[in-house]
Image: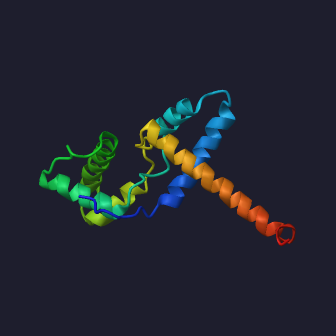
Amino acid sequence: MKYKGSTFEYKEERNADLLDAYKREMASNSNISLTEIAERIANSPSRRFWVSEERATIVVSSMLKGDSLSTMNATKREMFQEIYRRYIVYHKQHPTLTKREIIFHICNEEAPKWYLTPKSVIVLLHKVRKEARKKCYESRKRRLRFMFSL
């Protein structure tokens, strides 16, 4: 279903939200391990469904045809089933809207959780925190460029 080499257009937004969720968890209790933080983040509500509208449309269309999601990872399957459930309800309430319009609204609604495993959250956090440190270093280097020009 998904093509090799496809990219995720909301990656930077998701990473920023993930870093914010990490900072909130650290602020609420700094004496917990990274695995506990990852579990809390994975099960906490998210600002939106972190999937592109195009991908959600493709999967919902295949679900409407009766195709199975058995080959899909369990957390992704759960996310698409939630999107599909909301699609059915939204379509009954607003029959004049197109499938793409409905899915656009659904994808931008608050999601009940992140639909990531705690291991995935840890991997993403390591990448995001590394990128944040690099941006901070580059910013500091630009600000103090006279010291680095030697």
Counting labels gives 0
Image position of 76 (left or right of 113): left
Q: Is residue 89 left or right of residue 140?
A: left
Rendered image quadrant of residue 114: top left
Where is 136 relative to 83, above or below?
below
The structure residue drawn at horizontal position 18% and vertical position 56%, both measured from the top left corner, is 62
Side (left or right) of 143 relative to 122: right
Up-down: is 54 above or below 132? below
Please tell me which residue lies in front, 60 or 13: 13
Residue appearing at x 54%, y 53% in the figure: 15
Furthest residue toward top: 31
Residue 94 appears in which quarter of the rendering? Answer: bottom left
Residue found at the far left of this picture: 66
Is any atom of residue 102 visible in this view? no
Above or below: residue 78 compared with residue 50: above
Residue drawn at x 38%, y 56% is 51
Position of the C terminus by quadrant:
bottom right
Q: Quadrant of residue 146?
A: bottom right
Q: Position of residue 41 (x, y in %)?
A: 52, 38
- Judge whether residue 60 can be spotted in this image: yes
Front-most of residues 51 and 33? 33
Q: Position of residue 79 (x, y in %)?
A: 34, 45
Residue 138, image x, y percentages: 72, 64
Q: Look at the image and tell me in which quarter the N terminus lies.
A: bottom left
Q: Residue at x 21, y 46 (%)?
A: 69
**Left or right of residue 136, residue 144 in this image:** right
Q: Position of residue 32 (x, y in %)?
A: 62, 28
